Amino acid sequence: MVEAYKTNECDVLIIGAGGAGMRAALAASDAGLKVIVVTKSLLGKAHTVMAEGGIAASLGNVDPDDNWTVHFADVIEEGVYISNWRMAELVAKEAPNRVFELEKFGALFDRTPDGRILQRAFGGHTYRRLCHVGDRTGLEIIRTLQDQIIHRKNVTVMDEMYITKLVLADGRVSGAIGLKMDRGEFNLFKARAVVMATGGCGRVFKVTSNSWESTGDGIGLAFNAGAVLQDMEMIQFHPTGMVYPPGVKGLLVTEGVRGEGGILYNNQKERYMERYSPKKKELDARDVVARANYAEIQAGRGTEHGGVYLDISYKGAEFVKQKLPSMYHQFMEFAGIDITKEMMEVAPTVHYQMGGIRVDPDTGATNIPGLFAAGEVACGLHGANRLGGNSLADILVFGKIVGEGATKFATSENMPGFDEQEINAEIERVKGLVHPDGLNAYKLIDELTTAMSDNVGIVRDQEHLEIALKKILELKEKYPRVSAPGGLKYNHGLLAALELGNMLIATEAIVRSAIMRPESRGAHTRRDYPKKNPEWLKNIICSKDGDGMKFDTVPVPEIPEELKKYVKPEVY
Amino acid sequence: MDKINLKIYRKDPSVDEKEHYDTFEVPYVDGMVVLDAVRYVEENLDTTLAIRWNCKAAKCGSCSAEINGFPRLMCKTRIDKVGFNITVNPMGAFPLIKDLVTDVTGNWDILRKIPPFTPKELGPDQHFSMKQEDVERSKEFRQCIECFLCQDVCHVVREHYTDYFGPRHIVKAASLDMHPMDTIDRSTFLNKEGGLGYCNITKCCQEVCPEHIVITDNAIIQEKERAVDLTYDPLAMLIKGRRKKEKRVV
Ligand SMILES: Cc1cc2nc3c(=O)[nH]c(=O)nc-3n(C[C@H](O)[C@H](O)[C@H](O)COP(=O)(O)OP(=O)(O)OC[C@H]3O[C@@H](n4cnc5c(N)ncnc54)[C@H](O)[C@@H]3O)c2cc1C
Ligand code: SF4
Ligand code: SF4
Ligand code: FES
């Protein structure tokens, strides 16, 4: 008889091979543990590879006045005071160490004239703070970490392994079940500790900068295992995504363009950011610039394809090609536009989930013993608005912290037990999706993402949120009838069916949290509640309740006095 | 013209003895790339079609295939550049998994063999000091997105079952050799262990590289020349050695 599944044992199982997952793997490997890293794409292809502009770390190489306290204050203030202060402190203090560490691993950052790491300006950062490699910082980070990983004897990478469920035993997470896509084979992972590093959920929207894999799997997996989610209403729109041609709608135009001097114009040739943000102009925080772009387009001052203009051509061809090579090629090849001569057309695009799994700042532990999380899938650092460059800092700083947290847990706990029945039931569930007679998951995904983009946009209101919720609930009803023809091997139709389950959880949490927050704060803007409300200086949390979801609010942890002095008090 | 005639290679080697082609009609949208057309098929016409993609922005190197016989990224190939009759095949140099998806994991085994970054001692402030112009020399090679299209097109890798690592991996070694802080020279190693001598400089690899890396001229030929210098000319070895590299790995 052929075995129903293959069994793999390790000390720490890491789900995700983006920056967070790989950095976590190094931490556990440093401690001598046996580590397995699984990823749903190939090694080296994770979403992190797309990151462009840079990583924020207060080295002070360009602006000597910069230091961790300023970075800390920027995170708290621009996150509109609902960030977790301890996470902000850790990132501000540790990011420089992670950058230097990357350099020691072999990463090559751009340099200052005196040979140190060069830093560029980015929206919302008080000083020029982003260490960068042209506009391909993510690629450099991924390759550098990948080089480390492949030379470690105690780390095994299993790519194209799609995790379908976390397994629980004795009140703790004991492992996971995955489908090895290239073989159509089920795998059971037994682990003392499990780290979620699955990235974000941008793909639940139609127009997004995110890669194929960002479907909120980690949100769904953790939620189903009983983990608490937080701040799910906080979805970041990046101010500048491509608008034309249709095939690349949403594709990111890095903030680096504005960092290097790019100027936004409407169709009247007006530099409108002078009106919306006289001081910071194009380099104000993302939520501010994104809303301005949106407002200009809504007011009929947009471009032919429904965007606004972004101009960097005045800086000259040589400068543009050296500082922004990927952008130059991206526009040349996808849109046939030479950005050294012409203006770009851009519009807001869904970019980042600030919310996610609620974690302990110092270990990355979730509320479920044995389950840890870090990176975009985790929540707390960015509050209501993430600053550019802070995500790469986040994934490296908390990647290391979560790796150490999981190591500590794994070394003090035994290998947990397993419920054979639960494993078989999960395998049957997945197999049950493979038949030709059901609904095509892609059709449902299209309906879901369209509803999200149409109704849960940059400016929200009760009416449209309710429309989105109705659609989500309707699709949830239909979900049991989804199926995919073919077999278990490399079947994207099956993958779509599995992903849709997670997308429905993520979207329901997003929309219900958005309905719950009757104010405008950071990325969450309500047309019907345009003001910020001191009563909502809170985090919204959400967890599983039978077949449904329950919601609550928790106070934002109070910043200790010795840190408070760095932060401007909140004004209403 | 508003319809694309798309012919796609189909085979699952674990069940099919022979490949066949399926032909699909796909509506054309302005600015469309081949990946859009293939995904249209996968989402609307045949969800069992196996394809691999991730970023759809020419940044991850997942969507490599042979489009009308030419190795390209599907997400970077505009329909209006290749015409409306399109045949898509999987990369021929790698073992087939299913349809357009191939097994490229053998590349990790090669990467593992290349001696990793081996830095100098740190400066007194515990940090590297490097000039931008020195960083630039390695940068070209670090743009590699590991699409393996160059491996696919290389006739040595494809047909001659030698121990040649292939162009991607010479680029990798060059990126390390050109790192201003690295202390070893990998050229002799590439010659001895990596079969560099099998490359006969046809330059096909640099023609297909979507990142426009000048693979043959800037990486392969440089490594070859250094390997030759180091083997036959002790003086050159001394000079080069003093200029940059302290150690050689063989
Ligand atoms: C275009 C673009 C540009 C950006 N630029 C910047 C920038 O300049 N600076 C900055 O700070 N941030 C930037 N960001 C944001 C940043 O890149 C991401 O937030 C960050 O890389 C997320 O890293 P991560 O490690 O958390 O997850 P990811 O890199 O998303 O990795 C997730 C991993 O989890 C795996 N996974 C997911 N689900 C499953 C499953 N079910 N089973 C198995 N594996 C699974 C995936 O395969 C992948 O390996 C950018 C984002 C985009 C889209
Ligand atoms: S130049 Fe060398 S590596 Fe490149 S394709 Fe020709 S033989 Fe292969
Ligand atoms: S060198 Fe160019 S063609 Fe070869 S793998 Fe890298 S990016 Fe692809
Ligand atoms: S999908 Fe990433 S390179 Fe084509």
Image (cartoon, rainbow, N blue to C red):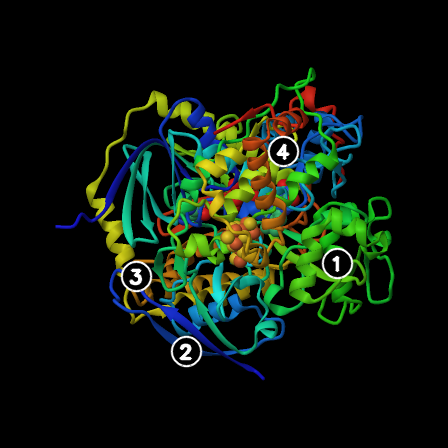
Q: Are marks 4 and 1 in contact (CB under 8 Å)?
A: no
Q: Nearer the viewer, mark 4 or mark 1?
A: 4
Q: Nearer the viewer, mark 4 or mark 3?
A: 4
Instruction: Please report the residue visible at 57 percent of the width from the left and 66 percent of the height from the top.
Output: B77
The amino acid type found where label 2 is placed reads: Thr
Decide: few, some or many residues near mark 3? Use Cα within 10 Å; few <14, some 14-19, many ≥20. Answer: many
**Label 1 and label 3 in one chain:** yes
Identify the chain of the residue marked 3, using the numbered disc in the image. Answer: A
Q: Nearer the viewer, mark 2 or mark 3?
A: 2
Q: Which mark is on residue A293?
A: 1
> Which is nearer the N-term, disc 2 or disc 4?
2
> Which residue in the protein does label 4 denote?
B179
Decide: few, some or many residues near mark 1? Use Cα within 10 Å; few <14, some 14-19, many ≥20. Answer: many
Q: Nearer the viewer, mark 2 or mark 1?
A: 2
The location of residue B63, given as percent across then percent down, is: 49, 58
Instruction: Please report the residue visible at 43 percent of the width from the left and 41 percent of the height from the top.
Output: B110
Identify the chain of the residue marked 4, using the numbered disc in the image. Answer: B
> Which residue in the protein does label 2 denote?
B23
> Which is nearer the N-term, disc 1 or disc 3?
1
Mark 2 and mark 1: Cα distance apart in space? 43 Å
Q: Are marks 2 and 1 in contact (CB under 8 Å)?
A: no
Judge whether residue A30 can be spotted in this image.
Answer: yes
The residue lying toward the viewer, choosing from A302 and A121, is: A121
Q: Look at the numbered disc 1 and give the secondary structure of its residue.
A: helix
The residue lying toward the viewer, choosing from A357 and B239, is: B239
State the count of labels.
Answer: 4
The amino acid type found where label 1 is placed reads: Asn
Q: Which mark is on residue A433?
A: 3
Image quarter for residue A383? top right
Residue A113 to residue B74: above or below: above
Instruction: Please report the residue visible at 53 percent of the width from the left and 43 percent of the height from the top.
Output: B170
The amino acid type found where label 4 is placed reads: His
